[in-house]
Image (cartoon, helix red, strand yellow):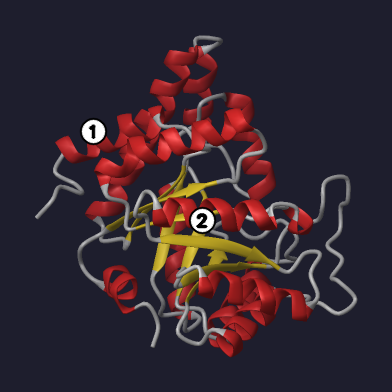
């Protein structure tokens, strides 16, 4: 039986709040991650995901910090897992490692090519698609709750939105329990994506992924990676803020606050924040959302 408590929350009328960390590469970055984890505990995230480096480059650190967030900070942790750089047997071992660590949910992704490479190349004895990874997790760890990624504006490598949606449907058909979207700054892109998904027979919860921009260059870079776009109005606000980091952050938080309010008012399953291991923007956003009546304790 899958992780029923989190699945029920995803399917309930009460919106969830979740965050995403990435594994640190240095002692200083590790201290920042743990400081952020401690600082965000008071908002009681329903789960925290932690990413997985290209080519399996953060395999040990992903598991290390997933355990630490779970055991020391009492987070429900959803580690990412990708197909990149691993054989089928290695993936089975990693899935079992997650299971033994008490991590009852996994985000299954194909993964991006290693730095410097343009095209995804599967391991000779590995998997080609996230749908195959979903199937493998179901085989090895059938009680695991499985999340997959969705692209409101199309995966950068997909030939068309229709093909991309077909790929998502296949991941769901293989056993994925919910979808988390890549970041977007235009809510209509999300609502259109949900409508198209429902028409394609995808009934699982679709959790919107949001990010507070802290620099214009960063927002553009992430959008290029994710196949999404920066609305002209947001771009103008970030340009107007110039080199004033406080003004840029305020503009980014304000934009996502307005996004979140509309999304929550229209009944989304919750919001998933790409926090880049930073406390400040998330604290400002969540304080505003709680003051506006969202995510308060019952």
The vertical placement of 4 against 27, above or below, is below
CB of mark 2 within 8 Å of CB of mark 1?
A: no
Image check: 9 left or right of 34? Answer: left
Residue at which label 1 appears: 288
Question: Between 81 and 162, which is closer to the camera in this rendering?
Answer: 81
Quadrant containing the N terminus in the rendered view: bottom left
| Few, some or many residues within 10 Å of mark 1 (<14, 14–19, 20+) | some
* Residue 138 picture location, percent across and down: 56, 86
Q: Earlier in the sequence, mark 2 or mark 1?
A: 2
Considering the numbered disc 1 on the image, is that residue within a helix, a strand or a loop? Answer: helix
- Residue 49 image label: none
Q: Which residue: 56% across, 24% down? A: 215
Percent position (x, y) of residue 189? Answer: 48, 54
Residue found 35% across the figure and 43% down from its top: 259
User: Count the marks: how many?
Assistant: 2
Residue located beneath label 2 in the image = 66
């Amino acid at each position: 039986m899958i992780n029923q408590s989190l699945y029920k929350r995803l399917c309930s009328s009460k919106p969830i709040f979740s965050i995403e960390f990435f594994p640190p590469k240095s002692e200083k970055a590790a201290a920042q991650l743990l400081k952020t984890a401690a600082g965000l505990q008071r908002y009681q995230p329903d789960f925290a995901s932690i990413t997985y480096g290209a080519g399996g480059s953060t395999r040990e650190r992903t598991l290390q910090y997933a355990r630490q967030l779970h055991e020391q900070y009492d987070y429900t942790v959803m580690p990412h897992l990708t197909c990149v750089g691993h054989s089928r047997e290695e993936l089975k071992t990693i899935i079992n490692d997650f299971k033994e660590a008490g991590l009852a949910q996994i985000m299954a992704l194909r993964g991006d090519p290693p730095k410097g490479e343009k095209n995804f190349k599967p391991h000779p004895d590995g998997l080609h698609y996230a749908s195959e990874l979903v199937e493998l997790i179901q085989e090895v760890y059938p009680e695991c709750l499985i999340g997959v990624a969705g692209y409101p504006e199309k995966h950068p490598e997909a030939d068309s939105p229709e093909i991309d949606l077909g790929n998502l449907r296949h991941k769901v058909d293989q056993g994925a329990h919910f979808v988390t979207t890549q970041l977007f700054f235009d809510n209509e892109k999300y609502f259109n994506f949900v409508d198209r998904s429902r028409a394609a027979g995808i009934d699982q919860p679709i959790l919107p992924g949001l990010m507070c921009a802290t620099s214009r260059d960063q927002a553009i870079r992430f959008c290029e990676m994710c196949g999404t776009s920066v609305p002209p109005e947001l771009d103008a606000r970030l340009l107007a803020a110039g080199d004033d980091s406080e003004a840029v952050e305020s503009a980014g938080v304000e934009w996502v606050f307005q996004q979140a309010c509309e999304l929550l008012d229209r009944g989304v399953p919750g919001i998933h924040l790409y926090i880049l291991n930073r406390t400040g923007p998330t604290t400002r956003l969540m304080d505003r959302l709680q003051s506006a009546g969202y995510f308060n304790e019952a």
